[in-house]
Amino acid sequence: VNRALVALFSTAVVLIAVELVLAARTSPVRIDPPCAARPLFPGHGVDAGTQRVVLDGLARAACSLGVSREALVLSFAGSGDGLGRPKQQVEDAVRSGLEDALTDATDRGEVPHLLAAILRAAIEHAPIDQLISGSLL
Amino acid sequence: MSRRLEVLSVAAVVAAASADSSIVALALPQLYGRFHTTVVGVSWVLTAYNAVVAVTAVALLALGVSLRGRLPYAFGVALFLAASAACAFAGDLRFLITARCVQGFGAAFVLGGSRQRAIGEWTLAAGVGVAAGPALGGVLTQVFDWRAIFLLQVPVAALGLFALRAVPVADPRDQPHAATRGAIFADLGIGLLFGALVGALFLSVLLLIPGWGYSPIRGAAIVSVLPVASLLVARLGRSLPEAVATVAGAALLALGLVALALLPRLGAVLPLCALALCGAGLGLALPVLSRTALTGIDLTRDTLRTVGARHLGLVASLALVAPLLSGNLPAAAGRAKLEAAKIVLDAPVGLTTKIGVALDLGRAFDRARAGDLPNLRQPFDAHGAGSDRSLAETRDRLVGTVGRTAAAAFRSAFAVCAAFAAVAAAIAFLGGRRRT
């Protein structure tokens, strides 16, 4: 048996085994179903609080539309293939989701009532694509 | 022109015609972008050339056309030269593919007409061409443009035209002779191995450069390990019984392609190792098969048959893997965008940074859709990933995830190429057992 040949085949087997182990160890990024429960964005302060409201609001909107949160965001960023739903329906879902998220954040004491009133007005009246594109994507 | 320079010039043309696919493969990512085409569309740049070489070789063989003397070679080089210039100035994909067909027609006459003047010299020329091909293609594409690859072929062909004296008028050994069963099986094996080579060259280049965002030179450096490994095992191949070298070589090539199919993450090391195995496999099997196919009795017909088999293998494989890959890529791109969106949304970084990175990433994806090479690191680096650990971790996670998704899209295509090599190994094994 030729040693060099054995070494080459051993290398091949080890390489494939290493790849399989690395693949098994890698945790894939899983796109959650539309209404999956997800932890709130962690952290303290205005920045983290704002992100909690926006992300929670988007998740609620995605749930009501029956699409993933990521697909919803991409549809606003212009990098997605669209959601196949009327624009007004999407806007209503996002406004409603953001309002509910803001209410919950206010109830948790994370957003002062005065700021909450200002944000609520923005959610109700600002163009939705600017609201999302300007605040998150 | 000295005799030695003339021989070298003809060898250079043979090398350019033989190694065409390994050089042009490096231009495919750029062509994909510039001509706003699909994977199937860009694959025709390779397929057209190889299909015409194969069909012309088989037709010349079937018609019994004599390629003796210097005229067929001169005709082939002249066509190759003109078509190379046309390729370099192609304004659209249709023109480029048409010019590639003419180039392939000329190449068939060059390869058949040069007739392995001395098998060793021309095989060496082809080997050097294949070895230098990826590096040359990568450097030319990155430093200049894809057009430089074809422009370079013009002076090479011109030199070959001026060195006609180096082409033999006749070969005294060239006696009409029916192909032996061994030679036919060897050609079948060569065709299958070249079909498998599509995975190691075409697919690897597409995965590394547009898929993983590596520069053409970096991609070329990785792919160049294939011909280097092939040359390094040449001595080992000579020390093995022919049947063992063929079976082991084809099996190693299959395993290398399986390793490419299973790439679990970004990074140069794993593809380097996998491509080195592919190269070692080719280096063990191909010389034995070439020696068996080129019996030395009827070089003209033997050469045409081998050239036809080699290029038919490439075409058959390209015809299978290009649509497969083209079908997988849109879904993979959609999945990669969703994964990237999730990573950015959940990233533990400030809102302002997140917005800036997300907008730049959206633009990078749009540019990638328009054909440019996606640089997913740049948006993070531009927003301070160098000093922000969280942002750097987010960048690495996103780039790694997109890379894994891209690699997964190539999996079935690599598997098809591995099957080509596995069939070659099985045929060689059964052939070896029958002989014993």
Image: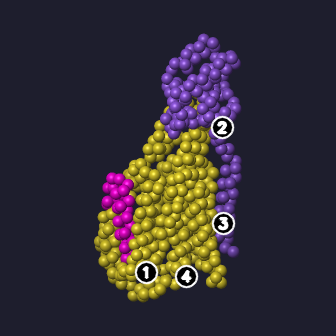
Chain colours: A purple, B yellow
Residue that mark 3 sits on? A9
Q: Earlier in the sequence, mark 4 or mark 1?
A: 4
Residue type, mark 3 in image: Phe
Q: Are marks 1 and 2 in contact (CB under 8 Å)?
A: no
Is any part of residue B347 visible from this angle? no
* SS type, badge 4: helix
Q: Tell me the CA gap for discs 3 and 2.
A: 43 Å
Residue B192 or residue B201, whichever sits in front? B192
Residue type, mark 4 in image: Gly
Q: Is residue B116 above or below residue B35?
A: below
**Magenta residues, as a range?**
B85-113
Callout 4 and callout 3 share a chain: no
Image quarter for residue B98? Answer: bottom left
Asked whether, in this view, residue A8 is left or right of residue B49, the answer is right
- B109 is within the stretch colored magenta: yes
Q: Are marks 3 and 1 in contact (CB under 8 Å)?
A: no
Residue that mark 4 sits on? B182
Residue type, mark 1 in image: Arg
Residue B80 place in picture, x, y as percent? 34, 67
Callout 3 and callout 1 share a chain: no
Using a 10 Å C-alpha cutoff, classify the residue at mark 2 as few (fewer than 14 neighbours), some (14 to 19) or many (20 or more).
few
- Dot 1: chain letter: B
Using a 10 Å C-alpha cutoff, classify the residue at mark 4 as few (fewer than 14 neighbours), some (14 to 19) or many (20 or more).
some
Asked whether, in this view, residue B4 is left or right of residue B248, the answer is left
Residue B112 place in picture, x, y as percent? 40, 76
Q: Tell me the CA gap for discs 1 and 2.
A: 63 Å
Residue that mark 1 sits on? B301
* SS type, badge 1: helix
Residue that mark 2 sits on? A33
Q: Tell me the CA gap for discs 4 and 2.
A: 59 Å
